[in-house]
Image: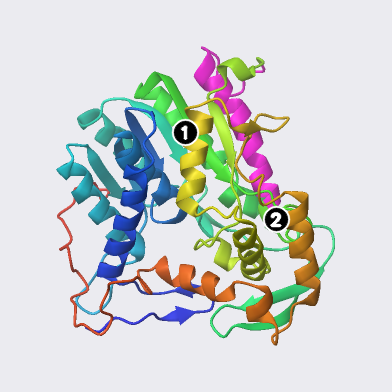
Protein backbone atom coordinates (compact mmCIF):
# COMPACT_ATOMS: atom_id res chain seq x y z
CA UNK A 1 0.00 0.00 0.00
CA UNK A 2 0.96 3.65 -0.42
CA UNK A 3 0.88 5.09 3.10
CA UNK A 4 -0.02 8.77 3.48
CA UNK A 5 -0.83 10.50 6.77
CA UNK A 6 -4.49 10.42 7.81
CA UNK A 7 -4.97 13.27 10.26
CA UNK A 8 -8.23 13.62 12.14
CA UNK A 9 -8.28 16.65 14.39
CA UNK A 10 -5.33 16.39 16.76
CA UNK A 11 -4.36 12.80 15.96
CA UNK A 12 -2.87 10.89 13.05
CA UNK A 13 -4.68 7.56 12.80
CA UNK A 14 -2.00 5.71 10.84
CA UNK A 15 1.79 5.45 10.79
CA UNK A 16 4.54 4.76 8.27
CA UNK A 17 6.67 1.69 9.14
CA UNK A 18 9.92 2.82 7.50
CA UNK A 19 9.43 6.41 8.63
CA UNK A 20 9.13 5.26 12.25
CA UNK A 21 12.27 3.17 11.77
CA UNK A 22 14.28 6.10 10.39
CA UNK A 23 13.06 8.46 13.13
CA UNK A 24 14.04 5.95 15.80
CA UNK A 25 17.47 5.43 14.28
CA UNK A 26 18.05 9.20 14.43
CA UNK A 27 17.29 9.15 18.17
CA UNK A 28 19.60 6.18 18.65
CA UNK A 29 22.43 8.08 16.96
CA UNK A 30 21.84 10.96 19.38
CA UNK A 31 21.94 8.53 22.30
CA UNK A 32 25.22 7.01 21.16
CA UNK A 33 26.71 10.51 21.09
CA UNK A 34 25.38 11.36 24.57
CA UNK A 35 26.84 8.62 26.73
CA UNK A 36 26.09 8.78 30.45
CA UNK A 37 26.25 6.47 33.45
CA UNK A 38 22.80 5.15 34.25
CA UNK A 39 21.06 2.08 35.68
CA UNK A 40 21.71 -1.51 34.69
CA UNK A 41 18.01 -2.29 34.21
CA UNK A 42 14.91 -0.18 33.64
CA UNK A 43 11.18 -0.60 33.23
CA UNK A 44 9.48 2.05 31.11
CA UNK A 45 5.71 2.10 31.55
CA UNK A 46 4.36 4.01 28.56
CA UNK A 47 7.08 3.79 25.88
CA UNK A 48 5.08 4.19 22.64
CA UNK A 49 6.43 7.62 21.71
CA UNK A 50 7.36 11.02 23.13
CA UNK A 51 9.12 11.16 26.47
CA UNK A 52 8.61 7.46 27.25
CA UNK A 53 10.17 6.28 23.99
CA UNK A 54 12.98 8.84 24.31
CA UNK A 55 13.70 7.50 27.79
CA UNK A 56 13.98 3.94 26.53
CA UNK A 57 16.26 4.97 23.65
CA UNK A 58 18.47 7.13 25.90
CA UNK A 59 18.85 4.39 28.50
CA UNK A 60 19.50 1.53 26.09
CA UNK A 61 21.84 3.25 23.65
CA UNK A 62 23.25 6.01 25.84
CA UNK A 63 23.77 4.04 29.03
CA UNK A 64 23.76 0.39 27.97
CA UNK A 65 20.67 -0.32 30.06
CA UNK A 66 18.60 -3.50 29.71
CA UNK A 67 15.02 -2.33 29.21
CA UNK A 68 11.51 -3.69 29.52
CA UNK A 69 8.73 -1.64 27.97
CA UNK A 70 4.99 -1.44 28.44
CA UNK A 71 2.99 0.10 25.60
CA UNK A 72 -0.56 -0.16 24.31
CA UNK A 73 -0.58 -0.11 20.52
CA UNK A 74 -2.53 -1.42 17.57
CA UNK A 75 -0.71 -4.13 15.65
CA UNK A 76 -0.73 -4.06 11.83
CA UNK A 77 -3.17 -5.92 9.63
CA UNK A 78 -3.18 -6.50 5.87
CA UNK A 79 -5.25 -3.36 5.34
CA UNK A 80 -4.23 -1.09 8.23
CA UNK A 81 -0.93 0.06 9.64
CA UNK A 82 0.03 -0.40 13.26
CA UNK A 83 0.13 2.60 15.52
CA UNK A 84 3.55 4.25 15.67
CA UNK A 85 4.47 2.81 19.07
CA UNK A 86 4.30 -0.75 17.77
CA UNK A 87 6.82 -0.02 15.00
CA UNK A 88 9.00 2.03 17.36
CA UNK A 89 9.41 -0.70 19.94
CA UNK A 90 9.78 -3.53 17.45
CA UNK A 91 12.74 -1.77 15.85
CA UNK A 92 14.26 -0.61 19.14
CA UNK A 93 14.30 -4.14 20.50
CA UNK A 94 15.86 -5.55 17.35
CA UNK A 95 18.71 -3.01 17.43
CA UNK A 96 19.21 -3.26 21.19
CA UNK A 97 19.53 -7.04 21.01
CA UNK A 98 22.15 -6.68 18.28
CA UNK A 99 24.21 -4.80 20.86
CA UNK A 100 23.78 -7.57 23.42
CA UNK A 101 21.16 -5.78 25.50
CA UNK A 102 18.03 -7.32 26.94
CA UNK A 103 14.98 -5.63 25.40
CA UNK A 104 11.45 -6.94 25.82
CA UNK A 105 7.97 -5.45 25.66
CA UNK A 106 4.40 -6.13 26.68
CA UNK A 107 1.68 -4.64 24.50
CA UNK A 108 -1.09 -4.20 27.08
CA UNK A 109 -3.23 -1.64 28.91
CA UNK A 110 -0.92 -0.50 31.73
CA UNK A 111 -3.87 0.32 33.99
CA UNK A 112 -4.94 -3.31 34.33
CA UNK A 113 -3.89 -5.79 37.02
CA UNK A 114 -2.99 -8.23 34.24
CA UNK A 115 -0.35 -5.78 33.01
CA UNK A 116 1.33 -5.65 36.40
CA UNK A 117 1.34 -9.41 36.88
CA UNK A 118 2.59 -10.00 33.32
CA UNK A 119 5.43 -7.50 33.76
CA UNK A 120 6.44 -9.05 37.07
CA UNK A 121 6.52 -12.47 35.41
CA UNK A 122 8.66 -11.09 32.58
CA UNK A 123 11.09 -9.40 34.98
CA UNK A 124 11.61 -12.65 36.86
CA UNK A 125 12.28 -14.51 33.60
CA UNK A 126 14.68 -11.92 32.17
CA UNK A 127 16.38 -9.09 34.04
CA UNK A 128 15.50 -10.36 37.56
CA UNK A 129 15.43 -6.94 39.25
CA UNK A 130 14.71 -3.34 38.21
CA UNK A 131 16.96 -0.36 39.01
CA UNK A 132 14.72 2.34 37.50
CA UNK A 133 10.98 2.57 36.87
CA UNK A 134 9.79 5.32 34.52
CA UNK A 135 6.07 6.10 34.48
CA UNK A 136 5.04 7.95 31.31
CA UNK A 137 1.44 6.92 30.70
CA UNK A 138 -0.95 9.27 28.91
CA UNK A 139 -4.45 7.99 28.19
CA UNK A 140 -7.91 9.50 27.80
CA UNK A 141 -9.66 6.88 29.91
CA UNK A 142 -9.07 4.17 32.50
CA UNK A 143 -11.07 1.04 33.21
CA UNK A 144 -10.98 -0.12 36.83
CA UNK A 145 -12.02 -3.75 36.90
CA UNK A 146 -12.72 -3.86 40.65
CA UNK A 147 -15.35 -1.14 40.14
CA UNK A 148 -16.44 -2.31 36.68
CA UNK A 149 -16.23 1.35 35.70
CA UNK A 150 -14.57 3.46 33.01
CA UNK A 151 -13.24 6.86 34.06
CA UNK A 152 -12.75 9.45 31.29
CA UNK A 153 -10.51 12.48 31.58
CA UNK A 154 -11.54 15.93 30.37
CA UNK A 155 -9.54 19.01 29.42
CA UNK A 156 -11.45 21.79 31.14
CA UNK A 157 -10.71 24.76 33.41
CA UNK A 158 -11.63 24.67 37.09
CA UNK A 159 -13.79 27.27 38.78
CA UNK A 160 -14.97 29.27 35.81
CA UNK A 161 -15.12 29.04 32.04
CA UNK A 162 -12.19 29.91 29.81
CA UNK A 163 -11.82 31.70 26.49
CA UNK A 164 -8.60 31.75 24.49
CA UNK A 165 -6.94 31.27 21.14
CA UNK A 166 -6.29 27.90 19.59
CA UNK A 167 -5.21 26.56 16.21
CA UNK A 168 -6.54 23.83 13.96
CA UNK A 169 -3.34 21.83 13.43
CA UNK A 170 -4.69 20.21 10.27
CA UNK A 171 -5.75 23.43 8.54
CA UNK A 172 -3.41 25.88 10.26
CA UNK A 173 -6.20 28.30 11.14
CA UNK A 174 -6.34 30.29 14.38
CA UNK A 175 -9.70 30.61 16.08
CA UNK A 176 -11.18 31.30 19.50
CA UNK A 177 -12.13 28.53 21.88
CA UNK A 178 -14.52 28.63 24.81
CA UNK A 179 -14.56 25.91 27.45
CA UNK A 180 -16.98 25.54 30.33
CA UNK A 181 -15.73 24.85 33.83
CA UNK A 182 -15.37 21.21 34.87
CA UNK A 183 -17.75 19.64 37.35
CA UNK A 184 -16.36 17.99 40.48
CA UNK A 185 -17.11 14.57 39.00
CA UNK A 186 -15.08 15.48 35.89
CA UNK A 187 -12.20 16.71 38.03
CA UNK A 188 -12.22 13.52 40.08
CA UNK A 189 -12.36 11.33 36.96
CA UNK A 190 -9.43 13.17 35.39
CA UNK A 191 -7.37 12.64 38.54
CA UNK A 192 -8.28 8.93 38.41
CA UNK A 193 -7.01 8.67 34.83
CA UNK A 194 -4.02 11.02 34.83
CA UNK A 195 -3.03 11.29 38.48
CA UNK A 196 -0.58 9.26 40.54
CA UNK A 197 -2.77 6.37 41.67
CA UNK A 198 -1.73 3.92 38.95
CA UNK A 199 1.97 4.84 39.29
CA UNK A 200 1.71 4.10 43.01
CA UNK A 201 -0.11 0.81 42.35
CA UNK A 202 2.67 -0.24 39.99
CA UNK A 203 5.33 0.47 42.60
CA UNK A 204 3.42 -1.38 45.32
CA UNK A 205 2.99 -4.41 43.04
CA UNK A 206 6.66 -4.43 42.05
CA UNK A 207 7.81 -4.00 45.65
CA UNK A 208 5.51 -6.76 46.90
CA UNK A 209 6.87 -9.08 44.18
CA UNK A 210 10.44 -8.33 45.33
CA UNK A 211 11.65 -7.36 41.85
CA UNK A 212 12.96 -3.89 42.74
CA UNK A 213 16.66 -3.53 43.47
CA UNK A 214 17.72 -2.09 46.81
CA UNK A 215 18.64 1.19 45.12
CA UNK A 216 15.70 1.37 42.69
CA UNK A 217 14.53 4.84 41.69
CA UNK A 218 11.33 5.86 39.96
CA UNK A 219 10.21 8.97 38.10
CA UNK A 220 6.96 10.23 36.61
CA UNK A 221 6.91 13.02 34.06
CA UNK A 222 4.86 16.19 34.19
CA UNK A 223 4.55 19.73 32.84
CA UNK A 224 3.95 22.95 34.80
CA UNK A 225 3.90 25.83 32.31
CA UNK A 226 3.35 29.55 32.87
CA UNK A 227 0.70 32.26 32.45
CA UNK A 228 -0.61 31.37 28.97
CA UNK A 229 -1.03 27.66 29.64
CA UNK A 230 -2.15 27.79 33.29
CA UNK A 231 -5.89 28.23 32.62
CA UNK A 232 -6.03 25.05 30.52
CA UNK A 233 -3.17 23.13 32.12
CA UNK A 234 -1.78 24.16 35.48
CA UNK A 235 -5.05 25.44 36.96
CA UNK A 236 -7.31 23.03 35.09
CA UNK A 237 -8.36 19.39 35.35
CA UNK A 238 -5.09 18.06 33.95
CA UNK A 239 -3.16 20.26 36.37
CA UNK A 240 -5.15 18.88 39.29
CA UNK A 241 -4.27 15.37 38.12
CA UNK A 242 -0.60 16.26 37.85
CA UNK A 243 -0.68 17.68 41.39
CA UNK A 244 -1.69 14.18 42.52
CA UNK A 245 1.70 12.97 41.30
CA UNK A 246 3.27 14.87 44.22
CA UNK A 247 1.10 12.94 46.68
CA UNK A 248 2.00 9.65 45.00
CA UNK A 249 5.69 10.53 44.94
CA UNK A 250 5.72 11.15 48.69
CA UNK A 251 3.98 7.86 49.43
CA UNK A 252 6.22 5.91 47.05
CA UNK A 253 9.26 7.38 48.81
CA UNK A 254 7.92 5.99 52.06
CA UNK A 255 7.33 2.62 50.40
CA UNK A 256 10.85 2.42 48.96
CA UNK A 257 12.79 3.90 51.86
CA UNK A 258 11.70 1.76 54.74
CA UNK A 259 9.65 -1.13 56.04
CA UNK A 260 6.50 1.00 56.33
CA UNK A 261 3.54 0.99 53.98
CA UNK A 262 2.63 3.69 51.43
CA UNK A 263 0.35 5.20 54.07
CA UNK A 264 3.21 5.69 56.52
CA UNK A 265 3.71 9.26 57.72
CA UNK A 266 7.49 9.02 58.11
CA UNK A 267 9.46 11.93 56.65
CA UNK A 268 11.65 11.29 53.63
CA UNK A 269 14.54 13.70 53.16
CA UNK A 270 16.22 14.69 49.89
CA UNK A 271 19.26 12.59 50.78
CA UNK A 272 17.28 9.35 50.46
CA UNK A 273 14.68 10.41 47.93
CA UNK A 274 13.97 7.65 45.44
CA UNK A 275 10.69 8.73 43.82
CA UNK A 276 10.84 11.81 41.64
CA UNK A 277 8.72 14.05 39.49
CA UNK A 278 10.51 15.17 36.31
CA UNK A 279 9.19 18.52 35.07
CA UNK A 280 9.75 18.88 31.32
CA UNK A 281 9.24 21.68 28.81
CA UNK A 282 6.36 21.99 26.36
CA UNK A 283 7.05 19.90 23.26
CA UNK A 284 5.18 18.25 20.40
CA UNK A 285 3.81 14.93 21.64
CA UNK A 286 0.65 12.98 20.97
CA UNK A 287 -0.62 14.16 24.36
CA UNK A 288 0.15 17.87 23.99
CA UNK A 289 -1.47 17.93 20.55
CA UNK A 290 -4.80 17.07 22.19
CA UNK A 291 -4.79 19.99 24.64
CA UNK A 292 -6.47 23.22 23.45
CA UNK A 293 -4.10 26.23 23.39
CA UNK A 294 -0.95 24.08 23.56
CA UNK A 295 -0.28 23.66 19.79
CA UNK A 296 -0.36 27.42 19.24
CA UNK A 297 1.65 28.11 22.39
CA UNK A 298 4.25 25.49 21.42
CA UNK A 299 4.52 26.96 17.91
CA UNK A 300 5.33 30.37 19.40
CA UNK A 301 7.64 28.91 22.03
CA UNK A 302 9.61 26.97 19.43
CA UNK A 303 10.19 30.09 17.35
CA UNK A 304 11.40 32.12 20.33
CA UNK A 305 13.57 29.41 21.88
CA UNK A 306 15.17 28.54 18.54
CA UNK A 307 15.96 32.20 17.93
CA UNK A 308 17.49 32.43 21.39
CA UNK A 309 19.48 29.20 20.87
CA UNK A 310 17.98 27.40 23.88
CA UNK A 311 15.51 25.01 22.26
CA UNK A 312 15.83 21.34 23.26
CA UNK A 313 14.18 18.35 21.64
CA UNK A 314 12.23 15.73 23.54
CA UNK A 315 15.28 13.48 23.51
CA UNK A 316 17.66 16.23 24.70
CA UNK A 317 15.32 17.00 27.61
CA UNK A 318 15.28 13.38 28.70
CA UNK A 319 19.04 12.94 28.47
CA UNK A 320 19.58 16.07 30.57
CA UNK A 321 17.11 14.94 33.20
CA UNK A 322 18.59 11.44 33.41
CA UNK A 323 22.26 12.39 33.31
CA UNK A 324 22.14 15.47 35.57
CA UNK A 325 19.14 14.62 37.75
CA UNK A 326 18.43 10.96 38.41
CA UNK A 327 22.06 9.97 37.78
CA UNK A 328 23.82 13.23 38.54
CA UNK A 329 23.68 16.09 41.00
CA UNK A 330 23.56 19.21 38.84
CA UNK A 331 19.88 19.26 37.86
CA UNK A 332 17.83 22.10 39.31
CA UNK A 333 15.29 21.07 41.96
CA UNK A 334 12.34 23.11 43.13
CA UNK A 335 11.15 23.55 46.72
CA UNK A 336 9.41 20.17 46.85
CA UNK A 337 12.21 18.21 45.20
CA UNK A 338 10.94 17.99 41.62
CA UNK A 339 13.66 17.70 38.96
CA UNK A 340 13.34 20.74 36.69
CA UNK A 341 14.60 20.82 33.10
CA UNK A 342 12.01 23.39 32.00
CA UNK A 343 13.99 26.41 33.17
CA UNK A 344 14.77 27.72 29.67
CA UNK A 345 11.09 27.75 28.71
CA UNK A 346 10.16 29.59 31.90
CA UNK A 347 12.94 32.22 31.70
CA UNK A 348 11.47 35.71 31.96
CA UNK A 349 12.77 36.90 28.58
CA UNK A 350 11.40 33.82 26.79
CA UNK A 351 7.97 34.08 28.40
CA UNK A 352 7.72 37.82 27.81
CA UNK A 353 8.45 37.40 24.10
CA UNK A 354 6.01 34.50 23.77
CA UNK A 355 3.28 36.54 25.50
CA UNK A 356 3.96 39.50 23.22
CA UNK A 357 3.60 37.33 20.13
CA UNK A 358 0.54 35.59 21.56
CA UNK A 359 -1.23 38.93 21.78
CA UNK A 360 -0.28 39.85 18.21
CA UNK A 361 -0.70 36.60 16.35
CA UNK A 362 -3.25 36.24 13.55
CA UNK A 363 -3.74 33.97 10.57
CA UNK A 364 -1.91 36.57 8.48
CA UNK A 365 1.30 36.68 10.56
CA UNK A 366 1.25 33.04 11.79
CA UNK A 367 4.32 32.02 9.79
CA UNK A 368 6.26 35.14 10.74
CA UNK A 369 5.68 35.03 14.50
CA UNK A 370 5.56 31.28 15.10
CA UNK A 371 7.18 28.05 14.04
CA UNK A 372 3.88 26.43 13.17
CA UNK A 373 5.44 24.63 10.20
CA UNK A 374 8.05 23.19 12.57
CA UNK A 375 5.27 22.12 14.92
CA UNK A 376 3.33 20.43 12.13
CA UNK A 377 6.47 18.71 10.83
CA UNK A 378 7.33 17.32 14.28
CA UNK A 379 3.72 16.23 14.76
CA UNK A 380 3.79 14.17 11.56
CA UNK A 381 7.22 12.78 12.43
CA UNK A 382 5.70 11.21 15.55
CA UNK A 383 3.90 8.89 13.13
CA UNK A 384 6.81 8.29 10.75
CA UNK A 385 5.91 10.92 8.15
CA UNK A 386 8.00 13.83 6.85
CA UNK A 387 11.21 11.88 7.58
CA UNK A 388 14.17 12.60 5.33
CA UNK A 389 15.25 9.66 3.19
CA UNK A 390 11.89 7.86 3.12
CA UNK A 391 10.13 7.32 -0.21
CA UNK A 392 6.49 7.97 0.63
CA UNK A 393 5.41 7.02 -2.89
CA UNK A 394 6.75 3.49 -2.53
CA UNK A 395 4.42 0.54 -2.17
CA UNK A 396 5.01 -1.01 1.27
CA UNK A 397 3.37 -3.67 3.41
CA UNK A 398 1.81 -2.45 6.63
CA UNK A 399 3.89 -5.04 8.52
CA UNK A 400 7.21 -3.89 7.04
CA UNK A 401 9.90 -4.14 8.20
CA UNK A 402 8.44 -6.61 10.70
CA UNK A 403 5.84 -9.33 10.95
CA UNK A 404 3.98 -9.40 14.27
CA UNK A 405 5.73 -11.83 16.58
CA UNK A 406 3.79 -14.54 18.34
CA UNK A 407 3.05 -13.37 21.84
CA UNK A 408 2.24 -15.09 25.07
CA UNK A 409 -0.97 -14.19 26.93
CA UNK A 410 -0.78 -10.54 27.96
CA UNK A 411 1.11 -9.53 24.84
CA UNK A 412 4.56 -10.51 26.15
CA UNK A 413 7.25 -10.35 23.48
Q: 246 or 362, which is in the foreground?
A: 362
At which x and y percent is residue 225?
70, 52
Q: What kind of secondary structure does the magenta stretch mostly adopt?
A: helix
| Labelled pair 1, 2 in contact (Cβ < 8 Å) | no
Q: Under tag 1, what secondary structure?
A: helix
Q: Which residue is mark 2?
A: 237
Q: Would residue 136 be visible to someone looking at this image?
A: no
Q: Is residue 211 left or right of residue 96?
A: right
Q: Which residue is the extreme one toward the right?
A: 160
Q: Single out the mark in the foreground, 1 or 2.
A: 1
Q: Is residue 77 left or right of residue 274?
A: left
Q: Which residue is mark 1?
A: 323
At which x and y percent is residue 140?
53, 60
Residue at 52% x, 48% y is: 147
Question: Is residue 247 on the magenta stretch?
Answer: yes
User: Image quadrant of residue 279?
Assistant: top right
Q: 15 or 211, which is in the foreground?
A: 15
Residue at 50% x, 20% y is: 256
Task: For label 1, count other residues whose C-alpha is less than 10 Å away and answer few (under 14), some (14-19) or many (20+).
Answer: many
Residue at 76% x, 62% y is: 353
User: Image quadrant of residue 167?
Assistant: bottom right
Question: Is residue 244 on the magenta stretch?
Answer: yes
Asked if residue 11 is positioned above or below residue 248 in the image, the reply reads below
Q: Would residue 309 be visible to someone looking at this image?
A: yes
At which x and y percent is residue 411?
26, 51
At which x and y percent is residue 211?
34, 24
The segment highlighted magenta reads 239-265
Task: For label 2, count other residues whose C-alpha is less than 10 Å away and answer few (under 14), some (14-19) or many (20+).
Answer: many
Q: How many marks?
A: 2
Amino acid sequence: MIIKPKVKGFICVNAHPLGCQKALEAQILQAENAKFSGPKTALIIGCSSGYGLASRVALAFGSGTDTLGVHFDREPSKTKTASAGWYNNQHLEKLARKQGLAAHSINIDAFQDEAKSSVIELIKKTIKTVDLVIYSVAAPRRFIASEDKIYSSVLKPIGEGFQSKTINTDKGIISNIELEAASQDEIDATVKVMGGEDWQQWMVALKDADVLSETCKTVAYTYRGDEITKPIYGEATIGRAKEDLDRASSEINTLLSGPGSPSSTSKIGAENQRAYIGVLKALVTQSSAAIPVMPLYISLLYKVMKQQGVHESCFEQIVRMLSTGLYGDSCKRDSVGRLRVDEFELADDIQQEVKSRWNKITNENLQELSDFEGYRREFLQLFGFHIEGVDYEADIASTAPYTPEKTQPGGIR
